[in-house]
Image (tube, rainbow, N blue to C red):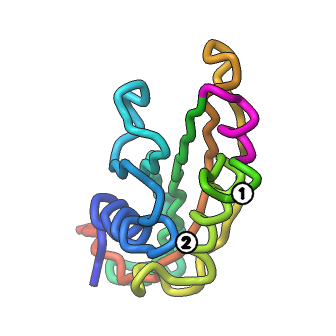
Amino acid sequence: MNPDIKDISLEIYNTLKNDGTLSAYVRHYDRSISNVSRKQFPYIAVGKVSCTIEPLTAGRHGYINKHYSINVIGGTYSLVPEIAYAGKEDGSKNGVLQLSADIVSALYPGTINDTFDHCIDISDVSIATDESTAGNHWHSLITIKGVRREMSSRNTA
């Protein structure tokens, strides 16, 4: 299997969408981070996927490591900023803190259906609010990283 960036994005999207905990309260899943204002809350979007290539051997058919970095964005909204951030104390509504923890739990530890050779790394989780919403909309940015070793298909001739 030699996945491209679209395949990896789809695997992560499907893993999140099929997670029982998340599906109980997340209202919208997307493979694009555009048009946040049009999303239903809470939402999860698989954002930017990037790849860097590390040659491991010389020659036309050597091995390479592909290092992938994927951003997953989650967002919550409430007229009460504290609920959008921390959720309700009785657990009837989750805030961005719980949403972030549930996204991480759905992905880690794991290889995303063997998309990656080893368990992924969660390299960053950051939570912020858009100041123009007076704290009513909170979002988290979760960056995950994974590595695949593949045969190079470079043609140098």
Q: Is residue 48 visible?
A: no
Which of the two discs, 2 and 1, sits closer to the camera?
A: 1
Location of residue 128 by image quarter: top right
x%, y% of residue 67?
A: 53, 66
Q: Amino acid at mark 1?
A: Asp
Q: Is residue 113 visible?
A: yes
First of labels 2, 1 by sequence position: 1
Q: Residue at the spot x=63%, y=12% of the render?
A: 132
- As helix, strand or loop, the secondary structure at mark 1 comes to loop
92 shown above or below 149 = above
Location of residue 135 by image quarter: top right
**Residue 113 got which mark?**
none
State if disc 1 and disc 2 touch (CB < 8 Å): no
Q: Is residue 22 left or right of residue 129?
A: left
Read off the residue under disc 1: 90
Tell me where the magenta segment starts and ends, as one range. Answer: 79-87
Figure quadrant of the C terminus: bottom left
22 shown above or below 135 = below
Q: Amino acid at mark 2?
A: Gly
x%, y% of residue 138?
A: 64, 35
21 shown above or below 13 = below
- Label 1: how many Cα within 10 Å (few below 14, some 14–19, many 20+): few
Q: Nearer the viewer, residue 72 or 42?
A: 42
Q: Residue at the spot x=61%, y=65% of the render?
A: 102
**Residue 146 got which mark?**
2
Q: Is residue 76 left or right of residue 127?
A: left
Q: Nearer the viewer, residue 17 or 21?
A: 21
Q: Nearer the viewer, residue 15 or 51?
A: 15
x%, y% of residue 136?
A: 63, 26
